[in-house]
C-alpha cells in the first residue's frame, strides 16, 4: 500500500495554502513585523515536517502497529475517539515539558511567532518538537489501540486540520461557539501571546479544561476536601 503519510502531508500543505489566503492581513503583519525571511522559514519547516518526517513516521507506524483486518463501525468510532484522547493527553504532557527549562530550547522557535500567527505557523516547529510532541502521541496511540488504516487516517487527518484551524485568526469568530472541552482558535492564539503554561492543550480535546473540572469535583466551596488538613478541620 502506498504511504498514506504523503497524502496526509501534501493534503496538509494544500490546506495551509488555502487557509493562508483567508489570513492575508496577518501574513502581511508577520512579514512587516518579523520579516519575509521569518515567514518563509515557517513554510520551510512546515514543508519538511509534512512531507518528510510525517510520512517516515507514518510508514513506521503502518508497518508495525496497524491492523489490516476489517473493523466494525463501533470499533472504528471508539478507536478514532481514543486516538483523539491519547493524542491530546500526549501533546498536553509533552507541551508542559517543553515549557520547562529542560525542553524550552526545542519549543522556542514555535513561540517566536507570538503576536501574529497564521496557519503555516501550526507546523512551524523544530524537528525535535515535531517528533516528540506531534508524532510520538500518534505512535503511542497506534501501539496501544492497533487501529486500522482508515482509523489512523481519519484521526490524523482531523487532528492535523484542527491544528491549522487553531492557528487561524480568520476563524477566531467561531471560538465562542466551540464547547469548553474542545480547543478554539482563541485559546491557542492566547497561548502564543502569553508563551506561558496556560492553554497547553492542542489541537482537539481541551485537557486543561478537563483537569480543571476534575479539580473542581474534588473541591467544595473552593476548599480541597482531598487535602488532609482540611479533612481534619471538617471543611
Ligand atoms: Zn501553536
Ligand atoms: Zn507552547
Image: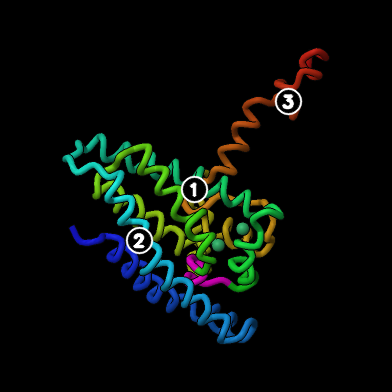
**Where is residue 187 drawn, in percent x and y?**
58, 56
Which numbered circle lies on residue 56? 2
Quadrant of image for the N terminus: bottom left
> Who is closer to the viewer here, 200 or 19?
200
Q: Are marks 1 and 3 in contact (CB under 8 Å)?
A: no
Does label 2 point to a residue whose CB lies under 8 Å from ligand 1? no
The reply to whether dot 2 and dot 3 touch (C-beta < 8 Å) is no
Q: Residue at x 36, y 41 (%)?
A: 143
Mark 3 — residue? 224
Residue 168 visible here: no
Side of 18 relative to 118 (left or right): left
Label 3 Cα crowd, 10 Å radius (few <14 / some 14-19 / many 20+):
some
Q: Label 1's element?
A: loop
Q: Is residue 43 magenta?
A: no
Q: Is residue 196 left or right of residue 42?
A: right
Residue 182: assigned label:
1
Q: Is residue 61 positioned above or below 110 on the image?
A: above
User: Which segment did they paint magenta?
Assistant: 117-123
Which one is in front in this view, the residue at disc 2 or the one at disc 3?
2
Q: Of marks 2 and 1, which one's residue comes earlier in the chain?
A: 2
Disc 2: CA contacts within 10 A as few (<14), some (14-19) or many (>=20): some
Image position, residue 176 (x, y; %): 53, 54
From the viewer's perspective, tell me whether residue 16 is left or right of residue 228: left
Query: Circle 3 — which element?
Result: strand
Q: Nearer the viewer, mark 2 or mark 1?
A: 2
Alpha carbon separation for disc pair 2 and 1: 29 Å
Q: Quadrant of the C terminus?
A: top right
Quarter of the rendered structure image containing ligand 2: bottom right
Q: Quadrant of residue 193?
A: bottom right
Task: Give how far across and how far down residue 43 sits, in percent.
Answer: 47, 77
Amino acid at each position: 500500500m502506498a504511504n498514506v503519510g504523503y497524502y496526509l502531508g501534501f493534503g496538509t500543505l494544500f490546506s495551509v495554502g488555502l487557509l493562508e489566503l483567508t489570513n492575508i492581513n496577518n501574513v502581511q503583519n508577520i512579514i512587516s513585523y518579523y520579516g519575509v525571511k521569518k515567514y518563509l522559514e515557517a513554510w520551510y519547516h512546515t514543508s519538511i515536517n509534512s512531507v518528510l518526517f510525517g510520512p517516515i513516521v507514518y510508514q513506521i507506524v503502518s508497518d508495525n502497529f496497524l491492523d489490516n483486518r476489517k473493523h466494525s463501525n463501533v470499533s472504528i468510532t471508539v478507536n478514532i475517539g481514543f486516538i483523539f484522547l491519547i493524542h491530546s493527553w500526549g501533546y498536553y504532557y509533552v507541551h508542559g515539558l517543553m515549557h520547562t527549562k529542560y525542553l524550552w530550547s526545542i519549543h522556542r522557535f514555535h513561540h517566536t511567532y507570538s503576536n501574529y500567527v497564521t496557519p503555516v505557523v501550526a507546523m512551524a516547529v523544530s524537528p525535535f518538537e515535531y517528533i516528540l510532541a506531534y508524532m510520538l502521541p500518534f505512535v503511542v496511540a497506534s501501539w496501544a489501540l492497533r487501529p486500522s488504516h482508515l482509523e489512523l487516517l481519519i484521526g490524523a487527518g482531523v487532528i492535523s486540520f484542527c491544528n491549522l484551524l487553531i492557528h487561524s485568526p480568520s476563524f477566531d469568530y467561531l471560538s465562542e461557539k466551540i464547547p469548553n472541552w474542545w480547543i478554539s482558535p482563541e485559546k491557542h492564539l492566547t497561548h502564543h501571546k502569553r508563551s506561558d503554561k496556560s492553554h497547553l492543550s492542542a489541537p482537539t480535546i481541551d485537557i486543561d479544561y478537563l483537569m480543571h473540572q476534575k479539580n473542581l469535583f474534588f473541591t467544595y466551596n473552593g476548599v480541597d476536601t482531598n487535602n488532609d488538613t482540611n479533612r481534619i478541620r471538617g471543611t
